[in-house]
Image (cartoon, rainbow, N blue to C red):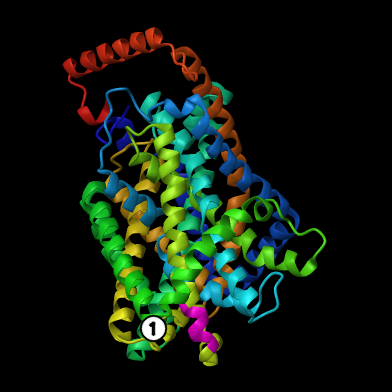
């Protein structure tokens, strides 16, 4: 495995050069004519949603069920690494990094705005009724639940398996070696890695754009600062400096500390809203919401609403957008969580990834959703506000509103920094021949590129930029989804051969497993004696 000091990693890769050129062209086009840029991207996104909505429903379901299957398969016993590999991070830090990178800004931005939107315009129920409230919470949890983590898990599994167990570089293209052979080392591999970079840039830029609008909304509500593109440009510039400083400090320092801070601030905000909001209604709604999520899981997963135009329109505006957003985020989150999951077993990895964040999501969106709907129902002026300011307007109706709003702004900013920090590492890794320690100058280039794309998308979408952000996510997800399909096939093909070789069945072949472990231990000792860096073993 090459590290950042090797000649190859010091030399700029073709993936870096071509990806930077593509991103630069997009930035220039968007800056010169933002309205045209937004119109064209919106038209493409509408076409994709109309003709590929069914496909997004199927591919996301397939990824989730693939992960669930692996939990019960003998493949689940395989370690994401060599037998001697131990987890690099504590379980607590690992879980916080997973959640911060995997959801981040969105859980704050949509915490009240999405349930309120569903309450006012549900897919099937009558608006502003008790049934609409229940459907609003159920739909929001569904969008932020296991499906997103199934997508992340499918990508992360292949990456971690091939990188840490098979000794491949961290490039996503290398995960396809079992089905493409040495072609992954040529132009085909470069194209796949460029698609990965493009999807990552767009997916993260969408999140950063959303975070920027909400920080702007909070500052407007608290201090009267204007909501406009100039102020949003200033916010992006300030936060860019902060996350580049974090990226410079390294993965284990910057991202780990920020991820732990995020969870502390989120817990404080969650408990405060639970106590200050309609507590008994929230507590009664929690088991109901969890039960509804489980009870309707399969039907909602596979429902493309072919016979209801109203529901089909709703699916395209919400579910299809979310599935596309998670798909476009999957290379970024997948690469990052693969990086921090070395030494975990496949089963441990998937169970943690599907259960823990989904449980947190059920609690989070029930608490904020019920509180937001109850307050907005009593204060109708809140629903007329943009989604970026609704949360702060709801806080204004609670005791200690100013401290709550300040904590929310700090949390959004911290999530912003964490996501961008993680993304600069991932993009640096993908454009540095898969190095686990990409050069700081390359991370800085990508940090600036991410902020530039985020601002261009805001320019293209007018005051909030939300439509342009949604369009970008839907477009970026389509080509990358085909890569994910190949990754799942490739992972299963190789991992199934590995488990056969080890005799991993319900009753494993202990003799063969012992032989394998002894051989791996001998190779490990030989590499240590040869002076190989401990981090690269």
Q: At x 32% / y 27%, what residue is drawn?
A: 1
Residue situated in front as seen by the camera: 448 or 381: 381
Observer able to see residue 273: yes
| Residue at the extreme right | 307
Q: Is residue 502 magenta?
A: no
Q: Is residue 60 above or below residue 313?
A: above
Q: At x 33% / y 24%, what residue is drawn?
A: 82
Horizontal side of residue 418 vs 174, given as left or right: left
Residue 214 location (% of width, % of height) = 42, 76
Q: Is residue 315 above or below residue 16?
A: below
Residue 266 location (% of width, % of height) = 33, 66
Q: At x 39% / y 83%, what residue is drawn?
A: 395
Residue 120 location (% of width, % of height) = 63, 80
Horizontal side of residue 150 vs 44, given as left or right: left
Q: Is residue 501 above or below residue 27?
A: above
Describe the element under mark 1 as helix, strand or loop: helix
Q: Quadrant of residue 335?
A: top left
Q: At x 38% / y 54%, what residue is drawn?
A: 99
Predominant secondary structure, magenta span = helix
Residue situated in front as seen by the camera: 181 or 294: 294
Q: Which residue is mark 1?
A: 395
Horizontal side of residue 531 vs 80, given as left or right: left
Q: Is residue 376 magenta?
A: yes
Circle 1 Cα neighbour tier, 10 Å, few/some/many (<14 / 14–19 / ≥20): many
Give the quarter of the figure containing the C terminus.
top left
Find the magenta span and give its range.
371-377
């Amino acid at each position: 495995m090459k590290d950042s000091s090797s000649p190859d990693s010091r030399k700029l890769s073709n993936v870096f050069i071509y990806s930077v050129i593509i991103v630069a062209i997009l930035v220039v086009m968007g800056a010169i004519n933002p309205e045209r840029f937004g119109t064209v991207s919106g038209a493409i996104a509408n076409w994709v949603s109309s003709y590929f909505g069914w496909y997004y429903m199927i591919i996301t379901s397939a990824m989730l069920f693939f992960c669930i299957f692996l939990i019960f398969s003998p493949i689940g016993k395989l370690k994401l690494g060599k037998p001697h590999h131990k987890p690099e991070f504590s379980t607590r830090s690992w879980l916080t990094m997973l959640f911060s990178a995997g959801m981040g800004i969105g859980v704050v931005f949509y915490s009240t705005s999405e349930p309120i939107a569903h309450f006012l315009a549900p897919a099937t129920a009558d608006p502003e009724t008790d049934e609409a409230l229940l459907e609003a919470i159920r739909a929001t949890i569904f969008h932020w639940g296991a499906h997103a983590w199934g997508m992340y898990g499918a990508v992360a599994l292949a990456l971690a398996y091939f990188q840490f167990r098979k000794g491949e570089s961290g490039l996503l293209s290398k995960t396809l070696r079992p089905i493409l052979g040495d072609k992954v080392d040529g132009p085909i591999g470069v194209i796949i890695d460029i698609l990965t970079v493009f999807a990552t840039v767009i997916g993260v830029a969408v999140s950063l754009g959303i975070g920027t609008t909400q920080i702007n909304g909070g500052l407007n509500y608290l201090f009267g600062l204007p909501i406009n593109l100039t102020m949003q440009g200033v916010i992006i510039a300030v936060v860019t400096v902060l996350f580049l400083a974090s990226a410079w400090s390294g993965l284990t320092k910057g991202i780990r500390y920020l991820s732990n801070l995020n969870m502390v601030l989120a817990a404080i905000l969650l408990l405060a809203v639970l106590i200050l909001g309609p507590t008994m209604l929230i507590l009664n709604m929690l088991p109901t919401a969890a039960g509804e999520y489980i009870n309707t899981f399969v039907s909602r997963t596979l429902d493309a609403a072919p016979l209801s135009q109203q529901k089909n329109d709703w699916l395209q505006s919400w579910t299809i957008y979310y599935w596309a957003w998670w798909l476009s985020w999957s290379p970024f989150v997948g690469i990052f969580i693969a990086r921090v999951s070395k030494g975990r077993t496949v089963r441990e990895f998937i169970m943690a990834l599907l259960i823990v964040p989904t449980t947190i999501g059920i609690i989070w969106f029930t608490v904020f959703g019920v509180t937001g709907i109850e307050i907005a129902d009593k204060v109708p002026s809140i629903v007329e506000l943009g989604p970026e300011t609704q949360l702060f307007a709801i806080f204004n109706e609670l005791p200690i509103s100013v401290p709550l709003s300040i904590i929310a702004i700090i949390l959004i900013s911290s999530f912003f920094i964490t996501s961008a920090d993680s993304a600069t590492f991932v993009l640096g890794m993908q454009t540095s021949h898969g190095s686990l320690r990409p050069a700081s100058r390359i991370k800085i280039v990508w940090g600036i590129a991410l902020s530039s794309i985020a601002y261009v998308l805001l320019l293209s979408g007018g005051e909030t930029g939300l439509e342009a952000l949604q369009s970008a996510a839907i477009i970026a997800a389509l080509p990358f989804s085909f890569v994910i399909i190949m990754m799942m096939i490739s992972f299963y093909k190789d991992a199934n051969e590995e488990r056969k070789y080890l005799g991993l069945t319900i009753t494993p072949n202990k003799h063969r497993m012992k032989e394998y472990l002894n051989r791996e231990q001998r190779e490990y000792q030989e590499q240590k004696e040869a002076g190989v860096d401990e981090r690269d073993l």
